[in-house]
Image: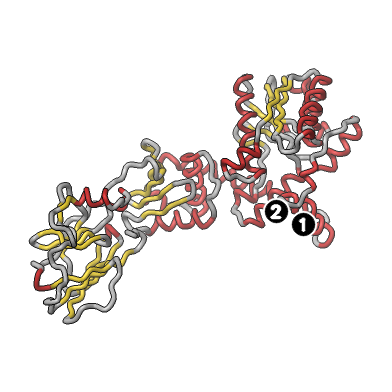
């Protein structure tokens, strides 16, 4: 099997002469074979090895014995072993992460910290061909694109996977031939986790009743899709300078440049932008990417899309920007005074808003937060709409004195991003309505009102409430 592992390493250029590697070892069959086989290949590649083990504190005394076993195995091979115990159950409670996700996050954190301290740039894990088949099938069941179908890559960033070309059966056979007695994790046989159910139930059923070589077929699909995805990804990276501009953590996509890309390039570009912004694409689904594309191509200026990870997408006149909602400065959407058709319909494209004005001789029976009713005879038409200006004041309905719009927004706890898209309706004598929030005292309906004006806001993506 060493020949097969070596061929895989060479095919994907996983190891160069003189490399220093940190090997992740749990004590199970996969990682034990990883350490043993690479130790046997040390002279061929002139490499130096170190081993790292994490006790996740899931299994009490068994976890402690795993750590002792790995340390003893490394002593027999003459390899340095770096170990730690991390209270993953406690982290699960505080973070809300699933057990597998939490363990993976903290394990890789320790591996990278250890590698950095040792001056090592490559970390090897024991993922094998059966893991690949399970991953591809699991991603297909969840619903995925080419990123998920390509499964586990032979190399990604600082992680290499020298065993990805061999099967679990070959690993078990190697253990027997070399007299290795790996530890067994009992949690691998529990069907609480999706991956375990796929390995223990679904794959055997597919293999028995549908395709005896289902694992090979899934791995072959992963390799084909992976190669095509890599090609598209490399192509998109070349287009990045002409399409994306990064300014202080805000990524701006040129509308024109983006619209000229093929749909496959558009999807990959958006995923790359999101990954560069937050370091990963966890939680980003196909629907999120498609909505992002729709916004970039046809979204109204000022419209906002919220994405997982507290990310936001905002449409401007010539570009679309991706930023973190926590620290992105609010950019006002300035709307110059626009006369409202009385009666009639007035479109305000900058706010993705339409105002419907109706004159009637009796009070409207119903009106919502997005509508306001005035005494027509108390107004001084024409009426206009704009966004707020510094120093704006009005007399809120029910109060005696004037109040600055700025203070009104603060007291009402209206988020800053919503303040900038709030329509201000006014006439020749002053502000009549902070659209969607509060009418002014002037123009209010009384028992003496005989003619009524109702204004209703019909909004698109920019929601005021």
Nearest to the observer: residue 93 or residue 435? 93
Which residue is at a point 67% across and 33% down the rendered structure image?
160
| The N terminus lies in quadrant | top right
Q: Is residue 317 visible?
A: no
Nearest to the observer: residue 196 or residue 35? 196
Mark 1, secondary structure of its residue: helix
Per the image, the residue denoted by label 1 is: 202
325 horizontally vs 26: left or right: left
Query: Hey, which quadrant is residue 365 in on the image?
Result: bottom left
User: Quick one: label 1, few (<14), some, or many (20+) residues within 10 Å?
Assistant: some
Q: Which mark is residue 464?
A: none
Per the image, the residue denoted by label 2 is: 137
| Residue 351 spot, x, y in % from top left | 28, 58
Vertical comparison of 152 with 398: above or below: above
Vertical comparison of 85 with 301: above or below: above
Query: Hey, which quadrant is residue 4 in on the image?
Result: top right
User: Quick one: label 2, few (<14), some, or many (20+) residues within 10 Å?
Assistant: many
334 horizontally vs 23: left or right: left
267 horizontally vs 364: left or right: right
Residue contact between numbered discs 2 and 1, judged by CB atoms under 8 Å: yes
Which residue is at a point 45% across and 42% down the rendered structure image?
239
* First in residue order: circle 2 vs circle 1: 2
Which residue is at a point 70% across and 25% down the rendered structure image?
83
């Amino acid at each position: 099997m060493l020949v097969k592992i070596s061929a895989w390493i060479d095919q994907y250029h996983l190891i160069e002469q003189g490399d220093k590697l940190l090997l992740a070892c749990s004590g199970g069959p996969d990682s034990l074979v990883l350490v043993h086989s690479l130790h046997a290949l040390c002279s061929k590649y002139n490499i130096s090895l170190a081993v790292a083990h994490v006790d996740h504190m899931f299994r009490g005394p068994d976890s402690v014995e795993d750590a002792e076993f790995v340390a003893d195995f490394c002593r027999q091979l003459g390899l340095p072993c770096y170990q730690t115990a991390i209270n993953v159950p406690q982290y699960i409670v505080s973070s809300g992460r699933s057990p597998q996700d939490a363990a993976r996050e903290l394990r890789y954190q320790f591996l990278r910290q250890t590698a950095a301290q040792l001056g090592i740039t490559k970390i090897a894990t024991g993922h094998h061909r059966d893991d690949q088949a399970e991953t591809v099938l699991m991603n297909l069941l969840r619903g995925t694109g080419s990123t998920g179908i390509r499964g586990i890559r032979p190399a990604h960033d600082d992680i290499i996977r020298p065993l990805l070309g061999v099967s679990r059966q070959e690993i078990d056979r190697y253990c027997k031939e070399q007299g290795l007695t790996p530890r067994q994790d009992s949690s691998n046989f529990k069907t609480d986790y999706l991956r375990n159910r796929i390995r223990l139930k679904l794959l055997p059923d597919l293999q028995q009743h549908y395709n005896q070589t289902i694992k090979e077929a899934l791995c072959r699909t992963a390799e084909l899709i992976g190669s095509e995805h890599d090609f598209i990804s490399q192509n998109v990276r070349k287009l990045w300078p002409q399409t994306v501009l990064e300014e202080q953590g805000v990524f701006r996509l040129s509308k024109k440049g983006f619209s000229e890309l093929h749909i496959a390039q558009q999807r990959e570009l958006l995923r790359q932008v999101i990954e560069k912004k937050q370091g990963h694409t966890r939680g980003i689904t196909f629907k999120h990417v498609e909505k992002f594309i729709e916004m970039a191509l046809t979204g109204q200026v000022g419209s906002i899309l919220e994405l997982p990870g507290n990310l936001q997408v905002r449409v401007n006149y010539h570009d679309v920007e991706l930023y973190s909602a926590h620290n992105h400065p609010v950019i006002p959407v300035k709307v110059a005074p626009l006369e409202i058709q009385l009666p009639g319909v007035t479109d305000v494209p900058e706010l993705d808003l339409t105002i419907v004005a109706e004159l009637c001789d009796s009070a409207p029976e119903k009106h919502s937060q997005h509508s306001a009713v005035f005494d027509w005879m108390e107004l001084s038409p024409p009426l206009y709409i704009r966004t707020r200006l510094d120093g704006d004041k009005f007399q809120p309905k029910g109060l005696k004195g004037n109040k600055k719009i700025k203070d009104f927004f603060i007291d009402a706890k209206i988020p800053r991003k919503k303040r900038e898209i709030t329509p201000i309706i006014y006439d020749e004598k002053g502000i009549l309505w902070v659209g969607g929030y509060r009418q002014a005292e002037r123009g209010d309906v009384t028992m003496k009102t005989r003619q009524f004006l109702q204004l209703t806001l019909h909004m698109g993506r920019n929601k005021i409430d």
